[in-house]
Amino acid sequence: MPKNSIRFAKEFNKFPMYNIIPLIIICFSFLAILIIVVRKFPAVATLDVENMPAEKEMRFKEKIAASRLERSLAKWKLHLGRVFGFFGQRIKSFFRWLNGKLREEKKKYSVPKMPEMIEPEDKETVIKNLFAENEALDDGEDFEKKEARLIKIIGLDAHNIEAFYSLGELYFLNKKNEEAKQTWAHAIKLLDDSETEKQAEIYNSLATLYKEALDLPLALETVKMASRLAPNSPRYLDALAEISIMNKDKTSAEEAVFRLAEVNPENGKIEDFKKQIEEIE
């Protein structure tokens, strides 16, 4: 027997059997684990994480959320498109309508060009005839005809106060208050400071307009202007007393009635005005 073998046998005999057996068991266990891992390694390497229940559930929820977001965005995009499309069409239609109305108004109110120059004497005759023709027309039924004649007069004489006043009155009678105010305001600008009677007439008409529109403070202000310009006019004092009472302006009403009694003592409304003034607190 070789010396090395004999030596190994002697060394081996030194270890008790109870120390060798556990070591053998550990080695076999390790070997079994290694075999199992080696066999299962291909399956672990090819494991599809996406097929795991928890992962699939999470991805499914993410997919649902993304799908809902896309549907919501598509729905709002559709709604916004309809809304802006609707308003876009309405705005476009409105401006088309407005442009048409402006063209109609421009055509209606444009002063017809005279075919040739009219001499001053002939112009006065034309204006007089136009006023006379208007007298025979009705303010309501023949509104456009009367309006056209008055505008034609203004085209012939841009400072014809009578035409401006009559045009404003025509507008007022046909409930076109804004046009009436603009026309009368322009007429006042054309008047000289010395033409107080005409100014007073226009201010009194404006006061009537504001009174009917229930703008009582402005009505009182304008009728006071008329009364200052024509302080002895019973008509303007009567209007001043009435509008002052409507405004519950006791001081202004008393003053107007006092002056009215001086210039027109036989006025039958004086006593009635005094009773109404007494009722003002």
Image (cartoon, rainbow, N blue to C red):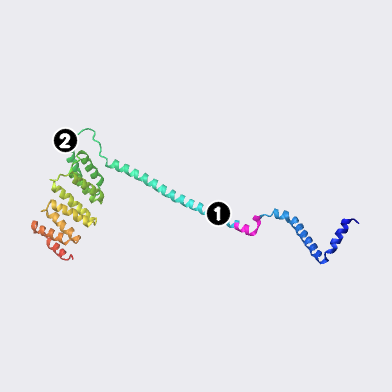
- Left or right: where 188 falls relative to 266: right
* Local SS, label 2: helix
Q: Amino acid at mark 1?
A: Ala
Within 10 Å of the Cα at label 2, are there few (<14), some (14-19), or many (20+) other Cα atoms?
A: few
Quarter occupied by residue 8: bottom right
* Callout 1–callout 2 Cβ contact below 8 Å: no
- Determine whether 19 is above or below 110 in the image: below
Q: How many numbered marks have been drawn onto this rendered protein structure?
A: 2
Q: Quadrant of the C terminus?
A: bottom left
Q: Is 221 colored magenta in this rendering?
A: no
* Local SS, label 1: helix
- Left or right: where 99 falls relative to 121: right
Name the residue at 75% across, 55% down.
38
Percent across and percent down for residue 118 are 19, 34
**Which residue position is annotated with label 2?**
120
Q: Is 54 colored magenta in this rendering?
A: yes
- Left or right: where 267 falls relative to 214: left
Q: Quadrant of the N terminus?
A: bottom right
Residue stretch rendered in magenta on the structure? 49-58
Residue 138 in view here: no
**Magenta segment main secondary structure:** helix
Q: Earlier in the sequence, mark 1 or mark 2?
A: 1
Percent across and percent down for residue 132 are 18, 43
**Which residue position is annotated with label 1?**
66
Name the residue at 63% across, 59% down.
54
Determine the residue located farthest toward the top in the rendered image: 116
- Determine whether 281 is above or below 112 in the image: below
| Viewer-closest of 242 and 172 | 242
